[in-house]
């Protein structure tokens, strides 16, 4: 069965640079969620989209923005990267209100 | 997470049963989930239970929910070395709030 696809899987950036993470949901899933998992931490909700509209917002820094496109894929844009942004970024998808299935994550390292 | 608490570590002998416990604070929790994360890997959904149920069994996994005490447990029967991982308890808070709130995770180590 098709799963959530995230790209890239690994990313190394320098401080103050910009990064774009991509998420391709499971076919026919219309809702996408982004989570950030710091080293040794539990995942923290960042933001979610339903039918291309932002549906909820969590602890997402103002330096980050995200959107969902007409094909339901989503991108998380991160600017002015800081060392503390180093983390595993997960995307999850679901049908509206249904169980979330997670992608493999993008591991971001900021040097 | 602040709203969901778990013990941090569990060591179990291969072939024994593992029981991972979780407590949550919000009585409006609707669904409660167990996710498994192996080292360097993503989050794998293991099972979930709706808040109006008290038990769910799926092969080697048994979930027990005590809504009065806000206590959730995951029992893994016949624990294998491949069960070594971090197990996260997570909740969604209401029928209109779908984001997951995770516990800190329990690291399960299976010894031979």
Image (cartoon, coloured by chain):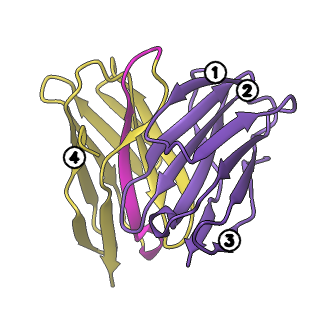
Disc 4, SS: strand
Marks 3 and 4 sit apart, C-alpha to C-alpha, by 30 Å
- Check whether the beta carbons of the residues at disc 2 and disc 1 lie within 8 A of each other: yes
Range of the magenta residues? B81-96
Query: What residue occupies the far bottom of the structure in this picture?
Result: B112
Front position among marks 3 and 4: 3
For disc 2, the marked residue is: A30
Mark 1 and mark 3 in contact? Answer it, CB < 8 Å.
Answer: no
Residue at x 50%, y 30% (from the top left corner): A57
Q: Position of residue A98 (x, y in %)?
A: 58, 25
For the residues marked 2 and 1, what is the alpha-carbon distance in whole angstroms?
A: 7 Å
Residue placed furthest toward the right: A71
The numbered mark 2 sits on a residue in which chain?
A
Picture layout, residue B86 above or below residue B61? below
Judging from the image, what is the letter of the chain drawn in yellow? B
Residue at 55% of width from left, 36% of height from top? A47
The percent coordinates of residue A23 (x first, y second) are: 73, 48
Residue B5 got which mark?
4
Q: Secondary structure at mark 3?
A: strand
Q: Which residue position holds label 3?
A: A10
* Foreground: disc 2 or disc 3: 3
Question: Disc 4: which chain?
Answer: B
Tell me the element at label 1. loop
Q: Quick check: do tags 1 and 3 share a chain?
A: yes
């Amino acid at each position: 069965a098709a799963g959530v696809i995230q790209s890239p899987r690994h990313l190394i950036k320098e401080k103050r640079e910009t990064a774009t993470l991509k998420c391709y949901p499971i076919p026919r899933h219309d809702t996408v969620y982004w989570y950030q998992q710091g080293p040794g931490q539990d995942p923290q909700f960042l933001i979610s989209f339903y039918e291309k509209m932002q549906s909820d917002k969590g602890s997402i820094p103002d330096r980050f923005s995200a959107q969902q496109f007409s094909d339901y894929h989503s991108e998380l844009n991160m600017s002015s990267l800081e060392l503390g942004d180093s983390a595993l970024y997960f995307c999850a998808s679901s049908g509206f209100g249904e169980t979330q299935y997670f992608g493999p994550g993008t591991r971001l390292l900021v040097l | 997470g602040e709203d969901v608490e778990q013990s941090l570590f569990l060591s179990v002998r291969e072939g024994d049963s593992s029981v991972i416990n979780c407590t949550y604070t919000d009585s409006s929790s609707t669904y409660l989930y167990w996710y498994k994360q192996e080292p360097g890997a993503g989050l794998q959904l293991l099972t979930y239970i709706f808040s109006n149920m008290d038990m769910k069994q799926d092969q080697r996994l048994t979930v027990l929910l005590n809504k009065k005490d806000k206590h959730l447990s995951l029992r893994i029967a016949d624990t294998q070395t491949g069960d070594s991982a971090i197990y996260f308890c997570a909740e969604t808070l209401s029928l209109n709030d779908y984001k997951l709130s995770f516990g800190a995770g329990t690291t399960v180590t299976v010894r031979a």
